[in-house]
Image (cartoon, rainbow, N blue to C red):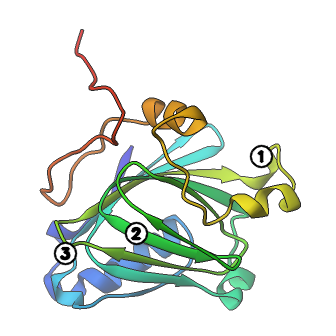
Amino acid sequence: METVFDSRLVPGRQRADAWEEVTSRSLVLTRQRFPDARMFEGGLHYGQLGEVGLSVASYTELRSSRTAKMIRRSDPDACHVSLIASGQQSIEQSGRTAVLGRGDLVVHDTSLPFEATVTSDDGPSRSVVLHVPRRLLPLRPPELTPLLAVRLPTARGVGRLLADSWPAWPPNTTGAPRRRPPGSPARRST
């Protein structure tokens, strides 16, 4: 994985603008708003697993939106499957809102508008996101839509399998302690 952004390397007054530019260029075009842009902290790592992208991000409070106009301008035609590693987040898409915390999974579609919110009462939030091209998914839009912006717990079932196989890292760019999702076993060194 490559470090794409580390807020510790950017002067405070430029961090929020730099984050918005990097995430829009590297992930998906969005508009970001911050309670106090000068205090923003964040890090982004990105890599490819064949045709699937993998990003690991840590960030303090923000609000991110993707509009129909942005989609017309740039659409990777993908679904993002996110594991919330720490913090509180929410996403609104297709008339639903998922309120998410540590250990939850959520799916959203880059071809539809969304509004996402991150709160950071106890330090930066972290998420691990798979960027899956829609053509690789076995689901058509009518089958996929009911899964968008729905909290998918990782305590059991398919959610547990996914969370257990998700990476135990990422590199930590904000100094926040690393945490594994609930129910995920600690990795043993051999």
Task: Return the residue at label 1.
Answer: 137
Q: Which amino acid does label 3 sit on?
A: Val
Task: Return the residue at label 3.
Answer: 10
Which disc, if any, is residue 171?
none
| Precedes in sequence: disc 2 or disc 3 | 3
Give the distance between the C-alpha atoms of the residues marked 1 and 3, in whole angstroms: 37 Å
Seen as rendered, the residue at the extreme top is: 190
Q: Residues within 10 Å of mark 1 (few under 14, many from 20)?
A: few
Q: Residues within 10 Å of mark 3 (few under 14, many from 20)?
A: some
Please tell me whether residue 79 is drawn above or below residue 25 in the rendered image.
Answer: above
Q: What residue type is labelled 2?
A: Gln
Please tell me whether residue 129 is drawn above or below residue 110 in the rendered image.
Answer: above
Task: Return the residue at label 2.
Answer: 89
Mark 2: secondary structure = strand
Give the distance between the C-alpha atoms of the residues marked 2 and 3, in whole angstroms: 25 Å
Q: Nearer the viewer, mark 1 or mark 3?
A: 1
Q: How crowded is mark 2: few (under 14 residues within 10 Å), some or many (20 or more)?
A: many
Identify which residue, 45 or 100, lies in the foreground: 100
Please tell me whether residue 59 is drawn above or below residue 130 in the rendered image.
Answer: below
| Precedes in sequence: disc 2 or disc 1 | 2
Mark 1: secondary structure = loop
Q: Which amino acid does label 1 sit on?
A: Leu
- Marks 1/3 in contact by CB < 8 Å: the verdict is no
Q: Nearer the viewer, mark 2 or mark 1?
A: 2
Please tell me whether residue 137 is drawn above or below residue 29 in the rendered image.
Answer: above
Q: Position of residue 43 (x, y in %)?
A: 28, 62
For image coordinates 71% across by 52% down, the residue present is 133
Residue 5 appears in the figure: no
Number of on-image labels:
3
Relative side of 117 to 59, left or right: right
